Amino acid sequence: MRFGFHISIAGGFSKVMERARRRGCETIQLFSRNPRGWAYTPLNQQEVDRFRKELSRTSISPLFVHLPYLPNLASEDPDLYGKSLGALQADLSRASSLGAPYLIIHVGHRVRLPEDEAIRRIAEGINEAFQKVRNSVMLLLETTAGQGTEVGHRFSQLRKIIRVVDERERMGVCLDTAHAFGAGYDLSTLKGLERTLAEFQEEIGLEKLHLVHLNDTRSPLGGHVDRHWHIGEGNIGLDGFKNIVNHPLLTHLPGIMETPRKDDVEDQRNMDVIRGLVEANP
């Protein structure tokens, strides 16, 4: 498994690679713009070219772009839905410009909508975005904790979305360990991990799994709360992560950490811990 972090773009994309190198990243994830707002400025082509050139000089791969937090394709509000669709289209294009083969999306909140109606709206929005943005970027649906009216906390929900999307070859999944645990998938034991992967295979197919977000959690099992924590210090624990990073069905995947961060020291500690769990011959 190739390990990395979500890297800040504060100060511009020219700062990203140095931050990634300091953390010993083998893969990275980033936002292409402010994750907590709708407005954005076009990418600076000179800065993008420099970023891509610096990235090409490293072995860091693959690059993941994460959609901002605000978009909600499950919304019945026309204004929010329209903004969300526009954001998805913009970031599909921006991901391609940055050289990222993957864009990650939080599935959304259905609020008052029935689940099947919310799933239909999500899939229709993805279809429209794919029709408008004709590139090779794969959209990864991130598993959720099921907090409030979140959609995507059961693998069956993700399967339903993917099956309604016309270009299924452009669809994949990001399994977030903290979210999955909060949703009721027990990743703290080998038995629970095996059950989780078996359900994923049955509902979606493991060939659709392209990324693991490696996050411990302060949420109880099935608590439906999103509370990321440091590797091995939460309810999944060191044994849980040791099973995850050495599982033969997962070792070929990239693993991105989104653990709490006050400074570089915390990132380095999490990187040291996760690498220390890797067995020589899993």
Image (spheres, rainbow, N blue to C red):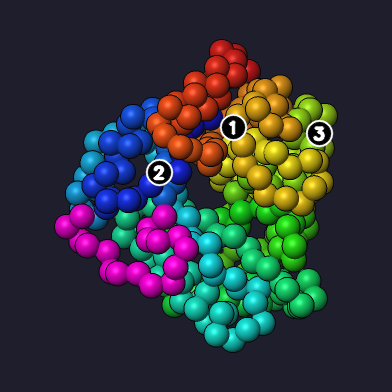
Image-quadrant location for residue 76: bottom right
Quadrant (top left/top right/bottom left/bottom right) for the C terminus: top right
Amino acid of disc 3: Gly
Between 70 and 57, the one lying in front of the other is 70
Disc 1 designates what residue?
Answer: 230
Q: Is residue 200 visible?
A: no
Question: Residue 137: x and y, percent?
Answer: 44, 59
**What's the distance in space between the residues labelled 2 and 1, CA to CA?**
16 Å
Q: Specify which label sits upstream in the sequence, 2 or 1.
A: 2
Give SS at disc 2.
loop
Report the side of 51 relative to 173 (left or right): left
Quick one: label 3 or label 1, which is nearer the N terminus?
3
In three-dimensional space, the C-alpha distance between marks 3 and 1, rounded to whole angstroms, equals 20 Å
Which mark is first along the chain, 3 or 2? 2
Q: How would you rate the neighbour count of disc 1 (Cα within 10 Å): few for under 14, some for 14-19, many for 20 or more?
A: many
Residue at the spot of label 2? 7
Q: Nearer the viewer, mark 3 or mark 1?
A: 1
Instruction: Name which quarter of the figure residue 264 lies in.
Output: top left
**Residue type for callout 2:** Ile
Tell me the residue at 47%/63% (across/down): 36
Magenta part of the chain: 31-47
Residue on which the image places disc 3: 192
